[in-house]
């Protein structure tokens, strides 16, 4: 019996689990009872130094990348909504900074994502970064990452980030294949790349970039070229991303209408394994399912990327549409910037939905996210007895050689590489499957991404 017996190649799951439990307005609308209970816990409960990561979402971009399904807004560089956003997120920081639970967290890892955080004008970027230092104790932070785009990365905003404690800068290059860059409408040129790499080197930042696989028309040779170039350039952290097209990504509609065709499941699985072999053989080390690091550049490792998926850490998430799990509550903030700003400026929490997380759900999370993203579950994290579903799944996976049961952990075998999300799905409960369906159902109607759509302006 083998892993292939469990998951025929055309049924292998590739869509990552990023959140567990998922929350959404479809299944977990914020009612007064849940809002009050969550707020009460934050105000009165002592976190006792519990470890935490902090995520901050900046929802602005210069353009909408054709493959992107995140909560973003296309804005001009002088759009006043960005100052309104900065005002609002500083108020959200102030709210958490006044809560006993948040003050008692030991924040060890910070990630600022988007969108494109450096779409913010320098003055607003400085305000946001300084606000984090003013409202939270960042003295224990190991890695502090900000996502950038080569079009908005400048010497001045790099200097601001360096001055205010950011020690990791990542950016999406996506591909070096000219044909694919043109297809994806990727604007930055090779000359721009060279200039920005020089800026990063001057400030001592390691090179950290994203590249994509399973793109329409991408061949095995195309993908190998991108992997080889990453290795030859000495990229310190290579973040590989599969092309997952869901609403509201513009390419999703072209695929749905039959105008584009994605690689088959077998081709996508082969490309993932190709990347794993190429990077490991070149001396890179596994960090998460998509992050591979050069062993000689420890400053490029995203510890945030690991502890994001462990129940050992709370995740305090700030910004429009940000999803977090803290004080035993899973929550999502208002996605719409105007609604987010209105709540933040009122001085209260900005949640749009939330539900309480039990020890049993924390344990489900360790299995689903741990096996899917990190390929292991430390037994020391498990908070409750194994459920019948967990026992049955573990037995089946071990018998088929997909999972190893060691004294300290459950971990994937070498044969299971590439099957990790199918394996993780074995531990997902029906209730959480329903929440994921609700989340996908709500996204197209709640995310405002098209710059041509009329949207309410957030006001200071």
Image (cartoon, rainbow, N blue to C red):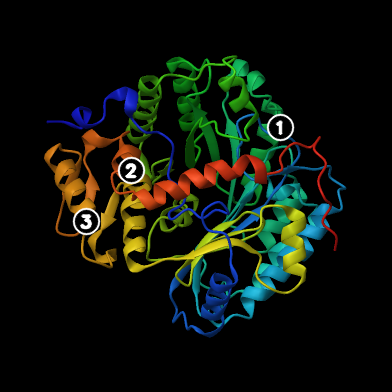
Question: What label does residue 44 carry, if any?
Answer: none
Residue at mark 3 to residue at mark 1: CA–CA distance: 45 Å
Q: Is residue 2 visible?
A: yes
Q: Position of residue 341 (x, y in %)?
A: 76, 62
Q: Earlier in the sequence, mark 3 or mark 1?
A: 1
Residue 165 placement: quadrant: bottom right
Q: Is residue 296 visible?
A: no
Q: Can you identify the residue that label 1 sits on?
A: 192
Q: Can you identify the residue that label 2 sits on?
A: 425
- Seen at 48% across and 72% down, the residue is 327
- Seen at 88% across and 47% down, the residue is 78
For the residues carrying marks 1 and 2, which lies nearer the camera in this image? 2
Residue at mark 2 to residue at mark 3: CA–CA distance: 18 Å
The N terminus lies in quadrant:
top left
Graded by Cα atoms within 10 Å as few (under 14), some (14 to 19) or many (20 or more), the crowding at tag 2 reads some
Q: Is residue 344 left or right of residue 15?
A: right
Question: What label does residue 409 carry, if any?
Answer: 3
Residue 32 placement: quadrant: bottom right
For the residues carrying marks 3 and 1, which lies nearer the camera in this image? 3
């Amino acid at each position: 019996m083998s892993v292939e017996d469990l998951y025929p190649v055309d049924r292998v799951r590739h869509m990552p689990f990023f959140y567990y439990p998922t929350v959404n307005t479809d299944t977990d609308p914020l009612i007064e009872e849940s809002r009050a209970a969550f707020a009460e816990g934050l105000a009165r409960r002592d976190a006792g130094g519990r470890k935490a990561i902090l995520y901050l979402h900046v929802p602005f971009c210069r353009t909408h990348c054709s493959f992107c399904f995140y909560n973003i807004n296309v804005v001009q560089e002088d759009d006043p909504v960005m100052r309104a956003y900065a005002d609002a997120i500083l108020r959200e920081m102030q709210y958490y900074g006044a809560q006993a639970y948040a003050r008692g967290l030991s924040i060890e890892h910070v990630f600022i994502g988007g969108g494109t955080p450096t779409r913010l004008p320098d003055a607003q970027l400085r305000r946001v970064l300084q606000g984090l230092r003013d409202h939270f104790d960042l003295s224990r932070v190991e890695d502090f990452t900000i996502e950038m785009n080569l079009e908005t990365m400048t010497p001045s905003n790099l200097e601001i980030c360096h001055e205010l404690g950011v020690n990791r800068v990542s950016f999406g290059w996506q591909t070096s294949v000219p044909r694919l860059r043109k297809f994806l409408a990727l604007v930055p040129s090779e000359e721009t790349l060279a200039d920005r790499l020089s800026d990063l080197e001057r400030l001592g930042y390691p090179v950290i970039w994203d590249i994509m696989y399973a793109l329409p028309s991408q061949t095995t040779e195309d993908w190998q070229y991108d992997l080889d170039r990453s290795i030859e350039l000495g990229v310190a952290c290579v973040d590989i991303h599969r092309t997952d097209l869901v609403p509201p990504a513009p390419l999703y509609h072209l695929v749905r209408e039959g105008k584009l065709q994605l690689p088959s499941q077998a081709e996508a699985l082969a490309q993932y394994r190709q990347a794993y072999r190429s990077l490991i053989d070149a001396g890179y080390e596994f960090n998460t399912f998509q992050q591979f690091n050069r062993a000689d550049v420890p400053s490029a490792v995203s510890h945030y990327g690991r502890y994001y998926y462990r129940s050992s850490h709370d995740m305090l998430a700030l910004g429009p549409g940000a999803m977090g799990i803290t004080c035993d509550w899973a929550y999502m903030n208002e996605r719409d910037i105007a609604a987010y700003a209105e709540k933040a400026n009122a001085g209260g929490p900005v949640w749009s939905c939330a539900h309480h997380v039990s020890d049993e759900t924390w344990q489900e999370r360790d299995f689903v996210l741990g096996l899917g993203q990190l390929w292991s579950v430390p037994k020391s994290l498990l908070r409750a007895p194994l459920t019948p579903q967990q026992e049955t799944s573990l037995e089946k996976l071990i018998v088929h050689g997909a999972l190893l049961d060691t004294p300290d952990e459950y971990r994937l075998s070498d044969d299971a590489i590439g099957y990790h999300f199918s394996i993780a799905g074995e531990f997902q409960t029906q209730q959480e499957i329903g929440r994921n369906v609700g989340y996908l159902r709500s996204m197209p109607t709640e995310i405002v991404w098209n710059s041509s759509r009329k949207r309410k302006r957030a006001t200071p």
